[in-house]
Image (tube, rainbow, N blue to C red):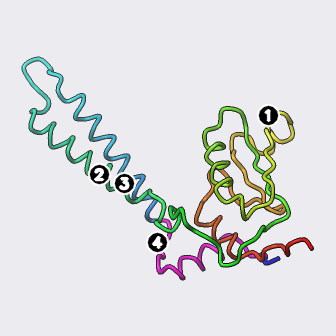
């Protein structure tokens, strides 16, 4: 089995696709989304009057809301997953099952856990059976993971925590040699 660390796989993918973005996209996207929220808040409270003084005219409020909308759209574009990760027709170079074990650590009421399971199930034809473990049933697991779920462990190695990166999962599937079919 081909064992490489996540950073190597991610860097190789960036080099192959020509998209070496680093961490600036999510940081800038988060900042723009925060600014959009602040602008909306200012526009919302600015319609109030303090005695004879109105804090902002209606036209200024409209411009603030328009600016907030533009910032929010730009933030969503920056925070969105790359096109390669959204391709529903994706197939690895070689068909077949990979990995000996896939464990998804979850907890009750965790929406990210449901998203992680959905992502793994979308790729189930390439993964062995997915074992779902509710950490709330075991105090040791609660202590180990706390609120940092979902956690995906593939072949004994923690691969994802908090969210499954579809692009990295696909790259991991592609980089792993499939099991030989039973004879």
Q: Would you place residue 4 above or below residue 76 in this image? A: below
Q: Quadrant of the N terminus?
A: bottom right
Compared across the picture, whether 20 is left or right of 120 comes to left
Q: Tell me residue 105's x, y (percent).
A: 76, 46
Q: Are marks 1 and 2 in contact (CB under 8 Å)?
A: no
Which mark is first along the chain, 4 or 1?
Answer: 4
Q: 147 or 175, which lies in front?
A: 175
Q: Would you place residue 140 above or below residue 12 in this image? A: above
> Label 2 belongs to which residue?
71
Compared across the picture, whether 143 is left or right of 84 comes to right
Alpha carbon separation for disc pair 4 and 2: 20 Å
Q: Are marks 2 and 3 in contact (CB under 8 Å)?
A: yes
Q: Are marks 3 and 1 in contact (CB under 8 Å)?
A: no
Alpha carbon separation for disc pair 1 and 2: 39 Å
Which mark is first along the chain, 1 or 3?
Answer: 3
Checking the image for residue 75, the label placed there is 3
Alpha carbon separation for disc pair 2 and 3: 6 Å
Q: Tell me residue 76's x, y (percent).
A: 38, 53
- Which element is circle 4 on? loop
Q: Within 10 angstroms of label 1, few (less than 14), some, or many (20 or more) residues? A: some
Which segment is the magenta one? Answer: 3-23
Q: Are marks 4 and 3 in contact (CB under 8 Å)?
A: no
Q: Would you place residue 19 above or below residue 153 in this image? A: below
Q: Within 10 angstroms of label 4, few (less than 14), some, or many (20 or more) residues? A: few
> Label 1 belongs to which residue?
136
> Label 4 belongs to which residue?
21
Magenta segment: does it hold 147?
Answer: no
């Amino acid at each position: 089995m081909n064992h490489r660390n996540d950073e190597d796989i991610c860097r190789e993918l960036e080099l192959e696709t020509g998209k070496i973005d680093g961490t600036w996209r999510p940081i800038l996207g988060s900042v723009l989304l925060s600014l959009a929220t602040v602008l909306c808040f200012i526009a919302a409270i600015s319609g109030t009057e303090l005695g004879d003084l109105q804090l902002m005219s209606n036209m200024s409020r409209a411009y603030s809301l328009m600016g907030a909308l533009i910032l929010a759209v730009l933030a969503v574009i920056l925070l969105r997953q790359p096109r390669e990760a959204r391709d529903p027709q994706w197939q690895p170079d070689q068909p077949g099952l990979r990995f000996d074990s896939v464990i998804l650590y979850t907890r009750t009421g965790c929406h990210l856990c449901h998203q992680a399971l959905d992502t793994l199930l979308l790729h189930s034809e390439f993964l062995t059976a997915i074992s779902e473990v509710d950490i709330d049933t075991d105090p040791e697991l609660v202590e180990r993971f706390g609120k940092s779920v979902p956690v995906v462990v593939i072949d004994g190695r923690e691969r994802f925590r908090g969210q499954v990166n579809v692009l990295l999962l696909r790259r991991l599937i592609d980089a792993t040699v499939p099991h030989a079919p039973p004879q």
